[in-house]
Amino acid sequence: MFTQSRLFLLVFFSLLFSVWLLRDLIIYLTPQPLSTLTQAPNNLKNKLFNLPAGNFFFQVTSASTIQGPVFLEGEINPPDVHIGDIQHLKIIVQSPSGIKSVTTRIETDNSEDIVELTHIGNISFKDMQSEKYLVDANGKLKILKGSEIALRHWIKIANEKLATAFSAKAASGDDKEMWEGSWTVHDTHDAIYHTTFIAEDNDGLTNSLTIAWSDACEIPPNGDWTLGQSGYKYDCTISSTDGVENGDITIESNNLVINAPFAFNPGYQININGGSIIIGTGQIKKTYLWICDKDGDGYTSGSTMGTVYAQDNAPQCGGKGGSGTGFYNLYQKLVHYLEPKKAMALPTCGSTTPVYTIRRYNFKGTNDCYNDSSNAYPNSTNLCADNRGDGSWDYNCDSIQEKELTQIGSCNTQYPLNCHDNCSYILIPGWKDTVATCGTSSEWLVNCTNTGTCITPDCSTACPLGKYTCENSNGINEIKTQKCR
């Protein structure tokens, strides 16, 4: 039986502990600005990929079915190193049986280095980053919101504090172990650069985590994308704004590193059946991908696709087009949401109403020679009577104004063999006298009259072959306009 003083102490410390938890709850529920995520500059002119500047912190989101060591977060400081530099490595990993060893394999242009990491100690949730993504029981990725992020993180900290007060281990049942190491760089990484963490637990189970800085992902412009054995079979890194349009994302195996905005459309999902998503300097967004294309034909005016935007509404391109004005922009929005695979160009010649932006899945190519007409683009088959808007008819961007019709018309006489038989004529349709220039109208021969008869000095006998004449044919003409490309 408690004495009065002991009861007082129990109530006092219970209230003190409650105030302590309440204070932490208020701190973690206070909205905190998320990091501004920008694409890191490429400091090496010959490098084929972008590397984050400064320290590279990352979180790992994995399938719940993973057995053995589970990677939680880490740090590479710095990722963009040169010969003679020292690179520091840190990883936080967890396993029910505890971690036996962690090694890092760094593959560069001409060599491979193995770095043995050292166990520094265990870490609490309070010293870790807030979890921004989770995988539900069905393997679907969920993007957490600001207040939800803070609340989940506080609950983890509170549970850990409660568990620590009554037992030696955190409520999760597993220690979160921190391992660190460093190495001196002695090779370049202009073409190949992979960093792989390999962890083994005390049950002999191993897992690896690869950050493939140099590898692209071969994401199709439209439709589903799979990372794993039934799709792209390698680890890959998103180093500039990218994503999947009009399709689901499935991670079967391997690792996807997010170092730039990575988008998937509303109404679709990310399934994680294996492998991991490593959140570095980028973020996952449920939104749309856009590019700038003034005439909306799917071809950009430069030698590349240009800037890709990941956002809900069309971006401002050239100072216009963000909110959309005019009939064409209304048409464009209907196409975006109702007919994802329909071409964006309206079927007219000459200058077209500018749209300024298109969804990225409509991208077809580069080097548009005239970005004010949706009918002018490389290899266009459009033939138009109107010039494209700048006085030129070069709609297929080959620097030549190719005419549709170049034939000169005529009526070829067919002479009869018998006296008084009618003469006949074979029609060759074409321009009368000269070929019309692009955009001009002229007479076009469409028919010949067959009224002539054989005429000889003496028509009492058969008309001698070659001894007759025929009346001139009468051509029937219409007006036609020359089209070009």
Image (cartoon, rainbow, N blue to C red):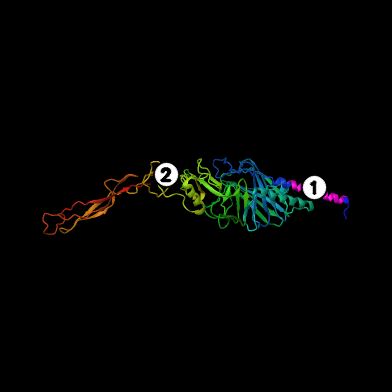
In the image, is 57 to the left or to the right of 438? right
- The mark nearer the N terminus, 2 or 1, is 1
Q: Amino acid at mark 1?
A: Leu
- Which residue is farthest front? 326
Residue 299 seen from this side: no
Residue 321 seen from this side: yes
In the image, is 28 to the left or to the right of 359? right
What residue is pinned by disc 1? 16
Q: For the N terminus, which image quadrant?
A: bottom right
In the image, 96 versus 85, the foreground residue is 96
What residue is pinned by disc 2? 351
Q: Amino acid at mark 2?
A: Ser
In the image, 126 versus 194, the foreground residue is 126
Residue 455, placed above or below residue 45: below
Q: Horizontal and vertical percent for residue 93? A: 69, 51
Q: Horizontal and vertical percent for residue 380? A: 41, 49
Q: Secondary structure at mark 2?
A: loop
